[in-house]
Image (cartoon, helix red, strand yellow):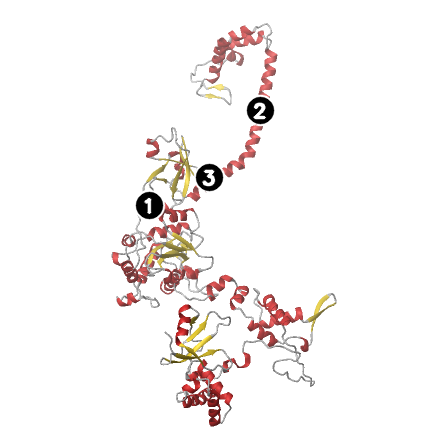
Amino acid sequence: MILENMTLQYTNKENGEKLRILYIDHESMYLYYVIMGMTMCMPKKELIDKLEEEIATGVLIKIADPFLNNIDEKDLSENARYKRDQQWEIIKKYWDSDKEAFLEKKGREKLFKEIADKENTSRVSIKRIFNRFWERGMTKNALLPDYKNSGAKGKERNLKSKKVGRPKKVDYIGEVQEGINITEDIKKIINLSIDKFYRKKEKPTIKAAYNSMLKEFFSDRYVENGEIKYNVWSKARIPSYRQFYYWFKNYEDIQKDIIFRGSKKEYELKHRPILGTTAMETDGPGTRFQIDATVADIYIVSSLNRNRIIGRPIVYMVIDVYSRLVTGIYTGLEGPSWMGAMMTLDNMIADKVEFCKEYDIHITKEQWTCKHLPEIIIADRGEFEGYSVENLINNLNIKIENTPPYRGDLKGIVERSFRTVNEKLKHKTPGAIQKEFRERGDRDYRLDATLTLEEFTQILIKMVLHHNHKIITNYNMDKEMISDELTPTPINLWDWGIKNKKGRLRVIDRDIMKLNLLPRGKASISRAGLKFKKLFYSSQKAIEEQWFVKAKQRWVDVVYDPRNMNDIYILHEDGKGYEVCHLLEKSLQYKDCRLEEIIFQEELKEELIEWEKDKQNQLNIDLDKEIEDLVKKANKEKKDTIVETNSKSKKLKGIKENRTLEKEINRKKEAFEIGRDEKEGIVKAFNKEAVEEDEEEKDIRRLTLMEKIKRKRDEKLGKK
């Protein structure tokens, strides 16, 4: 349906001719229109049916009114309002009364002439007034002058030989130095100079960049005393600083300036547009959890001795993006590392009533209800890049989104919570860091440390419970929330979201979660047991199935806790159960030890062995030499004592007799003689009536029969 003041455009014409409907005469079945965009557009006549057919076939399409705008009277100048009102009086006086005469071509020029005479102006002026009125929507503001187009703002001038711009002042000698026009070549130099001399990490000023441009492109170089110097050209040949600044502003790219003068990280963190909210990425509780760690701004003491300061604790926190509810925490001395993150994720699915009871804090289930797995975890790259993360992704179907380095703003909710915690600690707890740098004479706040790790955890739990019931002032609430008269606290948003939004939350057995969080490895199977990290283990299943007698496989996948290597775990094929493997006696020296300690001890042992290798090599060489010397001596003595008359058979037949003889000799030498002083070679006499004999007679009496036989054999062989 065609209506008055409707704007249409042709699709089958190259110039895309646009029309405005001025008037519709349903009795004659004609309408009147003007072609917009013409210098002097006058009304034309056409059949209504023809235009409706062109609209139906797509030759003409309806378009938005290009001249329709919202103008505030306060923004108009007095001159613009005066001209509009003056011309509007003419339109009111003649348009309604003579509408048919204006629309019909015949007699229109005569009408314009009559009006011009009455208004004491020219015919062309009257035509222009009506032309503007028809073309721009037949409203009062259609007659406003186009002052916004005056001066060709934003358009570059066509430069000629004459200097453009405001006139230069006369200098002190009475001459005027005109300067230069900024041609395309000069613009290229300015643009290049901005990139080269301004967009630098040193962050030079605009003036410094201008001076560098003059030195580089508008000066003569010369050498004086072996040093390169620059002679800048006269003002008549160089662009002024005002010109440089003007084009600097024209070429200004704030994003590019920040990135090149600072860094891309700085731009993303501090200057990028923030057009959305974190909650826009979620559609209910459990869609996204944010996890992060920080070093608390407080020093704590040992639970064994409060005089011992043990440094600052690590705080991990998991927060649901949709509701801002804290779903898991960890405080300890682990991390920031995977171990700390692992403990936090374990707490995320733990029963919070039981968890609080461990710290002598008694709550109801409604005060802290969460013990669920999310769909997505937003984390740092450090802790959440590794094999254990693959278990979360593949086994538990949790997506991990790692943020780029130094982009804490992408985890803004949990980062804000850390700031709140540290601000509260600063004002309420002893040992808190009061300021980053202490001045001379200030008391060392570390000496005020009083809280143990357990007491600090109690405080953190109290703060989390307070946070979960605190009103979020800047939360973007849905219409449904407002209709349900919901108070925007994290616990209320969590409970409301579970009832009214998509179900994203899942519950998992805590032991299964731990097995998926713990790191994995491979243990070898041998007769000595399951060998893992140079420790030996065994299990009931391995013994019953005789793994150590004849193994069906050489390796088995195990799960272990590096904080205590007393046990390792073999997961069942269904992923729901596990077999516990206990440390064997041969490895009990490492009982209750951390994996780091075990690795250190083993490396130390290997280093000691390596360090002793040179000495061992020398001992081996010395042993071989001593053996060779003894063998050589024995060969010489054998050669001296061999009797050629003895046959080979006789030698072999005497082995048994010779062995018996040698045995008796050894027994005599090896016999214990109690009370004998070997140093003086005398025997203490227990019989006081013993008679002293000379040395020769003593030797003869001590000789046994076998010794006499041996002596005779030696004499016979000529051996003395």
| Residue type highlighted by circle 1 | Ile
Which of the pair 62/173 is nearer the observer? 62
Q: Residue 602 carries which label?
A: 3
Quadrant in the picture for residue 238:
bottom right
Q: In which quadrant will I find the N terminus?
A: bottom left
The mark that comes first in sequence, 1 or 2, is 1
Which x, y percent locates residue 502? 31, 57
| Residue type highlighted by circle 2 | Glu
| Residue position marked by numbered label 1 in the rendering | 512
The mark that comes first in sequence, 3 or 2, is 3
Which mark lies nearer to you, 3 or 2?
A: 3
Circle 1 residues within 10 Å: few <14, some 14–19, many ≥20: some
Judge whether residue 466 can be spotted in this image: yes
Q: Is residue 482 above or below residue 396?
A: below
The mark that comes first in sequence, 3 or 1, is 1
Judge whether residue 4 can be spotted in this image: no
Residue pictured at 48% horizontal, 86% vertical: 127
